Image (cartoon, grey):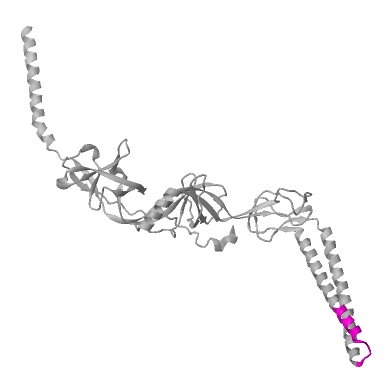
């Protein structure tokens, strides 16, 4: 029995020695293995830099419907929430009093015209008789003055007719602009006055529509410095892409109208206004949106894929680069913003550098690698919807 145990132990020791020998033979082979990585060779290119700014929509035009005459609302002539055209009748007031004033003014005009006709005949007659001495020159002057007074009375009567006609027309309240009309604040039978504070209804023109954006002053100053230094070109004429609250792109591109000349002291930001076509009325006043606005054109920009940039807990960014002899180097990098799936490099990398984007878990600084080339980062310009822009929005302002 003891002999069998010794034989078993001896066999186990021999097996262990054989395994260790095999591992020792394979060790040099593993040490000689060269990791395979994928790199991107950087190049310079022109890119359009964008920034996403928050904003809210506001109507292109807003008009509050107010009465210009006193009276009882006789009829409401529109459908709440519907579309109305400029000049369309919205309310009809009881106009009996204004009609009577108009008729009275026309009668007064007719009386003044008849009086003027008599004065004219008298003036013409005395003018002929004064030549023969049948009437005195004083009587002729009196007749001429009476004619002039009669003409003035006719002019005053015409003005009274015009005024009464205007008041009669004010009894029929019309839409000042085209657009969507909201809820009526009065109903049939309500008394309205020309100096009341509350509007009868509100009309909003929604096509096109404004998008008011906010931009921080620090961002605006850095952009202006870059433009002044010549490192960036202006892109104010580029279309603006609108992103809805759920992140989906709006199908119509906008156009930057202007930038506010003053800073809001409570937020430290300036306002930008974008005009956007809104034929389907998808955008409603007060909606929260974001807008991708072109901040500038950068020439000779260097882009690196985002997977090629690492960030440590302190926020420092680095990249693994294949250097001379295919040895891996760690390169401190400074990036500013994302451009699509890439980082925009400010310093640390340049055209011709080979940045490792795949196989990073198999390498460390100083290791020699086999580098395979990947596709270079594509230029990333400001995206623009395929549908019409807002270039002619103001010419089509009557559509909203």
Q: Residue at x 55, y 61 (%)?
A: 394
The relative height of residue 109 versus residue 268 in the rendered view (above or below) is below
Type of secondary structure dominating the magenta stretch: helix
Q: Residue at x 8, y 14 (%)?
A: 9
Image x and y of residue 17, in percent:
7, 22
Judged from this view, the residue extending furthest toward the top is: 1
Task: Please give left or right for residue 70 compared with residue 340 in the image.
Answer: right
Task: Please give left or right for residue 312 compared with residue 283 in the image.
Answer: left
**Considering depth in this image, is 191 or 396 the residue closer to the camera?**
191
Residue 9 on the magenta span? no
Q: Residue at x 88, y 83 (%)?
A: 141
Image x and y of residue 129, in percent:
91, 89
Tell me the quarter of the image containing the N terminus.
top left
| Residue 357, quarter of the rendered image | top left
Task: Please give left or right for residue 177 compared with residue 209 in the image.
Answer: right
Q: Residue at x 83, y 76 (%)?
A: 151
**Considering depth in this image, is 257 or 134 the residue closer to the camera?**
134
**Considering depth in this image, is 168 or 215 the residue closer to the camera?**
215
Q: Can residue 382 be seen at all in this image of the molecule?
A: no
Task: Please give left or right for residue 186 compared with residue 227 in the image.
Answer: right
| Residue 131, quarter of the rendered image | bottom right
The relative height of residue 116 versus residue 314 in the rendered view (above or below) is below
Judged from this view, the residue extending furthest toward the right is: 134
Q: Can residue 21 be seen at all in this image of the molecule?
A: yes
Task: Report the span colored magenta.
Answer: 132-147
């Amino acid at each position: 029995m003891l002999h069998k145990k010794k034989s078993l132990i001896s066999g186990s020791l021999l097996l262990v020695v054989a395994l260790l020998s095999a591992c020792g033979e394979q060790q040099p082979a593993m040490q000689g293995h060269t990791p395979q990585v994928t790199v991107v060779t950087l190049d310079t290119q022109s890119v359009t830099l964008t920034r996403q700014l928050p904003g809210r929509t506001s109507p292109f035009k807003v008009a509050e419907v107010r009465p210009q005459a006193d009276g009882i609302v006789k009829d409401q002539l529109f459908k709440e929430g519907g579309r109305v055209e400029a000049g369309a009748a919205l309310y009809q007031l009881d106009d009996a009093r204004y009609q009577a004033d108009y008729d009275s003014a026309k009668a007064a005009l007719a009386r003044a015209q008849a009086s003027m006709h008599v004065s004219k005949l008298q003036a013409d007659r005395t003018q002929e008789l004064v030549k023969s001495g049948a009437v005195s020159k004083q009587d002729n002057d009196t007749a001429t003055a009476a004619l002039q007074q009669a003409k003035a009375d006719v002019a005053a009567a015409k003005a009274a007719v015009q005024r009464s006609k205007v008041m009669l027309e004010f009894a029929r309240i019309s839409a000042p602009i085209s657009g969507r009309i909201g809820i009526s604040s009065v109903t049939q039978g309500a008394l309205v006055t020309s100096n009341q504070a509350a509007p009868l209804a509100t009309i909003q023109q929604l096509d096109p529509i404004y998008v008011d954006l906010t931009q921080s002053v620090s961002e605006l100053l850095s952009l202006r410095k870059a433009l002044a230094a010549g490192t960036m070109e202006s892109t104010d004429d580029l279309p603006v892409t609108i992103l809805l609250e759920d992140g989906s792109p709006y199908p119509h591109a906008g156009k930057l109208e202007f930038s506010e000349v003053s800073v809001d002291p409570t937020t430290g930001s300036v306002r930008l206004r974008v005009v956007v076509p809104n034929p389907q009325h998808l955008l409603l006043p007060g909606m929260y949106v974001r807008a991708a606005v072109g901040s500038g054109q950068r020439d000779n920009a260097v882009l690196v894929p985002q997977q090629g940039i690492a960030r440590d807990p302190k926020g420092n960014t680095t990249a693994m680069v294949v250097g001379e002899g295919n040895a891996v180097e760690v390169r401190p990098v400074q990036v500013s913003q994302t451009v699509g799936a890439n980082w925009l490099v400010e310093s640390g990398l340049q055209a011709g550098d080979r940045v490792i984007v795949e196989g990073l878990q198999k390498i460390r600084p100083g290791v020699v690698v086999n580098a395979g080339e990947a596709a270079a980062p594509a230029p990333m310009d400001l995206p623009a919807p395929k549908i019409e822009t807002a270039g002619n929005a103001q010419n089509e302002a009557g559509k909203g």
